[in-house]
Amino acid sequence: MQCARPVGIVDACICIDLCNSSLLDTLLLLPYQLIVPDVVAQQELKPTDLDRLLAIGACIGTASAQEVAMVDCLRQVHPRPSTYDLFVLAMAITRHAVLLSNDKHLRDAARREGLIPLGILGLLDMFETSVPGPRLAVALECILKGGARLPATECESRIRRWQQPP
């Protein structure tokens, strides 16, 4: 699949956080074409969340035969990430894409594979020049209320910064 923008392969937790964030309408401001692996879309996302992501321009990506085979190899080297997360990793590796995840084990595996993972906090930081700070603060609070496990200190720091008047 050819995209005009760099590709970002997203895992389930990023998809869920984005749906909880109240920022779906701003995703087109991201420099990435978001791709949700089909196994993640089918097995880990609520249909309503998937529909919302597709409506704002995310795509569903099907793993190639090479990527499917790579999952078994990656499992030998990285036993902690789930099978679904290994699909995200394999697709990010072969497509030279950004890996978008909050999952510690997947992010660690991505770093060991030479990728630079980006989490929801990094994505929110990218919106700072185009989305008002108070809206970012509310979005992060919604993500946290939705059950995201993120570093408390980093979240509190961002919320305080975003709530301050410009």
Image: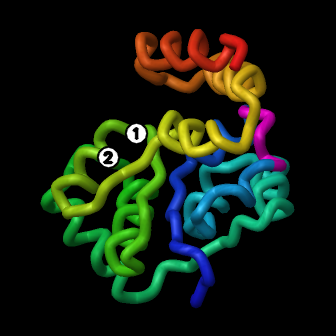
Nearest the viewer among 95 and 74 is: 95
Query: Which image quarter is the C terminus in?
Result: top right
Name the disc covering residue 107, or none: 2
For residue 65, side relative to residue 135 (left or right): left
Does the stretch in magenta take in 77? no
The quarter holding residue 162 reads top right
Q: CA distance from mark 2 to mark 1?
A: 6 Å
Question: What is the chief secondary structure element of the magenta stretch?
Answer: loop
Q: Residue at x 57, y 48 (%)?
A: 12
Residue 8, horizontal then vertical, whole percent: 52, 64
| Residue at the image point whose x is 14% and y is 59% from the top | 77
How would you rate the neighbour count of disc 1 (Cα within 10 Å): few for under 14, some for 14-19, many for 20 or more?
A: some
Q: Position of residue 148 (x, y in %)?
A: 56, 26
Q: Secondary structure at mark 2?
A: helix
Residue at the spot of label 1: 103
- Asked if 82 appears above or below 164 in the picture, the reply is below
What range of the chain is rendered magenta? 21-25
Query: In this rendering, does residue 44 appear at all?
Result: yes
